[in-house]
Amino acid sequence: MKLAVYSIQNTLFEGEVESITLPTLTGEITVLDNHIPLISLVNSGAIRYTCSGTKYAIKLSGGVLEVRPGSEVVILAELS
């Protein structure tokens, strides 16, 4: 699936990933390929994603998640 993570200052990540796990206001969720469309507020914590078998994390203090049709995920992140 395609992931794009942006802050006001710059692009934090753009690329293909296998999974994304992040904190929302109602709890932690994991987004996989072909997830249903979704818009949610992101809570403070870390976005964790797996890219080519390697795990990465981006710390943030909040943001907005949009899961689009066609396995496209966009996160507008607020950094602390």
Image (cartoon, rainbow, N blue to C red):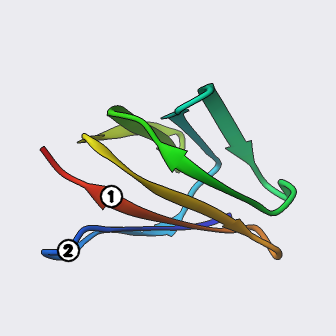
Q: How many marks?
A: 2
Q: Which residue is mark 2?
A: 8
Horizontal side, residue 64 vs residue 21: left or right: left
Q: Observer-nearest residue: 8 or 35?
A: 8
Mark 2 belongs to which amino acid? Ile
Horizontal side, residue 78 vs residue 42: left or right: left
Q: Could one spot residue 12 in this view of the protein?
A: yes
Q: Could one spot residue 55 in this view of the protein?
A: no
Furthest residue in direction top, as rendered: 27
Q: Secondary structure at mark 2?
A: loop
Horizontal side, residue 71 vs residue 72: left or right: right
Q: Which residue is mark 1?
A: 77
Question: The C terminus lies in which quarter of the figure?
Answer: top left
Mark 1 belongs to which amino acid? Ala
Q: Position of residue 5 (x, y in %)?
A: 39, 65
Label 2 crowding class (10 Å Cα cut-off): few <14, some 14-19, many 20+?
few
Q: Do callouts 1 and 2 mark residues in contact (Cβ within 8 Å)?
A: no
